[in-house]
């Protein structure tokens, strides 16, 4: 087989688990062969983001969000599933300045999302125990789920799409 530049190669078919690749693990030592299944196990197929847990007491703000944010373009390409799950958030004695959130969201200038599996965006649990703001622009607790694209939105989802807010 002759050495060819990338531009000289012809297109192939889908990679299978038994395809072989060269893997150099030690400098100045010849490569060993690994299978596509070994690479897939190492890299993984899925993206999972999970928010944490917080409690707001008084005039402060905390988030337990699971989010992907960019002012510019977001490009996501996955062989498996993507799951964003908000955490647990509690606001005690909240007012206009105390805010707590357990959101799950993707927000970008434009969003390109390509996943062969499922896309699941589920908000966490947010509670406001007292003192919620009366203004619609303020919140004491927010458990929402969303995809916001301020430009082009090009989703390709191989299986199921689930977007769910909570209490």
Image (cartoon, rainbow, N blue to C red):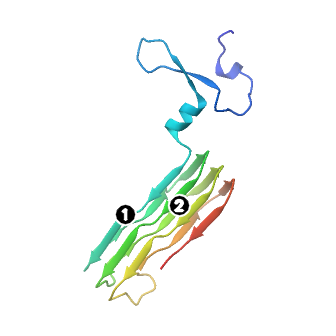
Q: Residue at image x 62%, y 53%?
A: 113
Res. 106 mark:
2
Q: Residue at image x 66%, y 60%?
A: 160
Please, which residue is most extreme toward the top here? 2
Among the 4 quarters of the image, the one containing residue 16: top right
The crowd level at tag 1 (other Cα within 10 Å; few <14, some 14-19, many 20+) is some
Residue 84 in picture, x, y percent from top left = 50, 60
Return the disc, 1 or 2, that comes first in the chain's sequence.
Answer: 1
Among the 4 quarters of the image, the one containing residue 152: bottom right
Q: Residue at image x 57%, y 65%?
A: 148
The answer to whether residue 121 shows anywhere in this view is yes
In what quadrant of the picture does the N terminus appear?
Answer: top right
Cα separation between marks 1 and 2: 17 Å
Tell me, yes or no, whether the two marked residues, 1 and 2, touch with CB atoms within 8 Å: no
The answer to whether residue 140 shows anywhere in this view is no
Among the 4 quarters of the image, the one containing residue 10: top right
Residue 137 in picture, x, y percent from top left = 44, 82
**Of 82 and 108, which appears nearest the observer?**
82
Res. 52 mark:
1
* Secondary structure of the residue carrying numbered label 2: strand
**Of 122 and 96, which appears nearest the observer?**
122
């Amino acid at each position: 087989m002759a050495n060819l530049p990338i531009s000289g190669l012809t297109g192939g078919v889908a990679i299978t688990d038994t395809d072989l690749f060269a893997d150099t693990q030690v400098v100045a030592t010849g490569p060993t062969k690994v299978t596509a299944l070994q690479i897939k196990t190492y890299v993984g197929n899925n993206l999972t983001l999970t928010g944490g847990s917080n409690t707001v007491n008084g005039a402060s703000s905390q988030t337990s969000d699971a989010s992907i944010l960019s002012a510019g373009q977001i490009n996501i390409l996955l062989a498996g599933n993507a799951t964003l799950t908000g955490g647990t958030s509690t606001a005690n004695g909240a007012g206009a300045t105390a805010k707590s959130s357990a959101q799950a969201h993707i927000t970008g200038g434009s969003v390109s999302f390509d996943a062969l599996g499922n896309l699941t965006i589920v908000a966490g649990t947010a509670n406001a125990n007292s003192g919620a703001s009366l203004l619609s622009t303020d919140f004491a607790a927010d458990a929402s789920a969303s995809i916001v694209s301020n430009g082009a939105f090009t989703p390709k989802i191989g299986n199921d799409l689930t977007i769910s807010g909570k209490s």
